[in-house]
Image: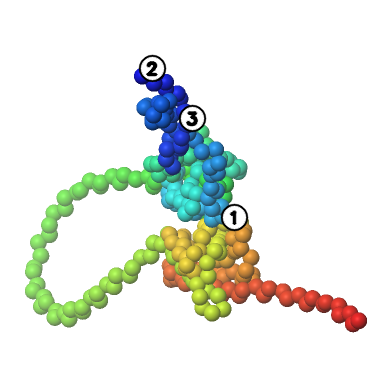
Amino acid sequence: MSSTCTVYKSGNSNTSSTNNYAYFWINKHSHTAVYSNTYPPQPNPTATPTAGPVDTILPEGHIVSPTDGAFLGTGWFEVTAYATDYQSGVKKVEFHFYHDGVWHMVYEDWSGSDGWKASVDTTGFWAQNDMKLLLWIEDNAGNRVQSNVISALTNVPVATPTETSVSTPTRTSVPTPTSTRTVVPTPTSTKTPMPTPTNTPVTDPMSGVISGTIVDEKGIPASRVDVWLFRDTQESVYWVKWVEDGTFVFDGLPYSTWIVQVEEVSDNDMWEEVEPQIVVINKDTSDSVVTFNLTQKQIPMFKVFVPFVMR
């Protein structure tokens, strides 16, 4: 019998949980593996991607600059904004500019890596005092929300008064008459002390704050609701806040009358409708606190009648 062994290629074997496949060559006489070769991992055809949670939270944001009544000039100016989203992230920020009686979308910022901003050109605009700015913020789940509206923007410069030069009259020397000097006694005067001025603090017209709490019938903080802020001079929403712990704060508000309203999110239907509250922010009242007491909706009960048959 020849001593030469015959070698066969034998099947494949899954050698580990990472799906590495090996091929073995078997000695016909001793039935032992004499060579093997391991192949790279193969994709698992049964793997199914897992879907993440659905984003139903509205993004948040507002215009940082310019502010109400700002002078924009007659060339380029920059708009800076703040935008955030707590779940899927901000996808883009649209900058809308109202001039010549019409709203225009002037820029879309898709990055935000260097801050959310836009440069706007007003070259060639006719003089106007009613230009406005607002944002539309969109997250990666398609939720969109409008920001506060900046109004009364102008490209009309403030007139500077013209200086009028006054000519200095020519001085004419007059001879001094000779007179007899009479000594007059100096009257005694009583010095009246001057009152010490009182420093009155000046309130910044953009420093208004509206804060508040939202609780249920038991005083427990409510969650999964939105707080909408409206300015009495504007029809569109000024600011939207998502409430998770029963508290909210709107700061940096100009003097105005404000309407604070609580709204349920789209997938939540458990609270009765509550009346909005009106808040006035001025130099005397720049910080206001409001409270909303929510009532949970009653689940309707249904009676079921089962017929009873006697035999």
Q: Is residue 215 above or below residue 244?
A: below
Question: Separation of disc 3 and disc 1 at Cα?
Answer: 72 Å
Residue 94, image x and y in percent? Answer: 52, 43
Task: Left or right? Give the position of 304 relative to 258.
Answer: right
Image quarter in which the N terminus is found: top left
Residue 26, image x and y in percent? Answer: 42, 27
Residue type beneath disc 2 = Ser
Residue occupied by mark 2: 2
Residue 181, image x and y in percent? Answer: 8, 69
Task: Left or right? Give the position of 103 relative to 6.
Answer: right
Residue occupied by mark 1: 236
Residue occupied by mark 3: 11
Question: Separation of disc 2 and disc 3 at Cα?
Answer: 26 Å
Are the two marked residues, 2 and 3, in contact with CB atoms closer than 8 angstroms?
Answer: no
Residue type beneath disc 1 = Ser
Image quarter in which the C terminus is found: bottom right
Foreground disc of the pair 2, 1: 2
Q: Quadrant of residue 35?
A: top left
Report helix, strand or loop for mark 3: strand
Marks 3 and 1, the one that precedes in the sequence: 3
